[in-house]
Every structure is written in C-alpha cells, then in structure tokens.
Image (cartoon, rainbow, N blue to C red):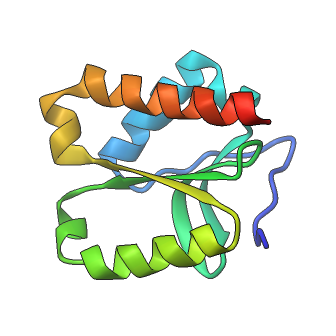
Amino acid sequence: MLEGRRKKEKSLNVQSGPEAFFLNLFQKMGWVERFGIDTQVKIKGNVVDFYFSDLDMILEIDSHHHKRRREEDIRRDLELVRNGYKVYRIDWERFKKDPRGEVIRLAKYVSYLDRLR
C-alpha cells in the first residue's frame, strides 16, 4: 500500500512555498508527531504533498498549475479513496483569500478523523 514508510529519524521535504507554509504550521501545532505526518511520500504510484499516516489521510496543496490538471487530480483522488485513503485538497489561491478559514476547516476535518480512530 504505502511505498515509503515513516522512519523514526526523517527529513521532511517540501516542493513549494505553500507546502513549506503548511509544514511549518503542522510543526508548530504538534501535528507532525501526533499524526505521523510525512512529506513527498509515494503512495499507489503518486507522490503526495502530505501523508498523515496515523489517519490514512493525504493532504494536497493545489497551486495555480493544478487548474490545468483538474481531471487528472480527480482520477488520482478516486484511486486513492478506492484504496482506503482520505484525500483533502486546499486551493492555494482560495487559501490566500481566507487563510484562517481554510486552516479552521482543515483542523475540523483532522479532528473528525482523529475521533474516528
């Protein structure tokens, strides 16, 4: 299922400014350890932005280039969901307009998944 396993000592890598922002936020919130967050993990042949291993949740940060890849993203998400993963996407442009609201929505979703464990 998961091609890159979480290690005790790991280096968290990000590919973009938005990903770096969220990694920093997750570290400050204590989520990296609490939910086993890893970055740039290959799952089912796809490299995902963030993998919350303890929740089987994938977080993708969609920057402007994702608008051209929308259909590909939908197919990819369906494949991941069929394999038991939960996929949450944040549109970076929408995030910039309402960062607090987007973080609150994400936190509510993560809290919901945490309660289901």
Residue 63 vs 105, above or below: the answer is: below
Query: Between residues 11 and 99, which one lies in front from this camera angle?
Result: 99
Determine the residue located farthest toward the right in the rendered image: 8
Q: Quadrant of the N terminus?
A: bottom right
Q: Nearer the viewer, residue 14 or 49?
A: 49
Quadrant in which residue 93 is drawn: top left
Q: Which residue is at a point 64% across and 27% down the rendered structure image? A: 31
Residue 99 drawn above or below residue 59: above
Side (left or right) of 57 relative to 35:
left
Choose between 74 and 97: the one closer to the eye: 74
In the rendering, at what x and y percent does residue 109 appear?
52, 34
| Position of residue 113 measured from the top left corner of the image (x, y, whole percent) | 65, 36
**Along the line of sight, which residue is nearer the eye, 70 or 18?**
70
Look at 23% across and 37% down and name the residue there: 95
User: Residue 15: x and y, percent?
Assistant: 42, 56
Residue drawn at x 60%, y 31% as measured from the top left: 112
Q: How many marks?
A: 0
Would you place residue 2 above or below residue 21 in this image? below
80 on left or right of 15: right
Residue 11 image offset from top left, x and y in percent: 68, 46
Tell which residue pokes out farthest to the left in this image: 97
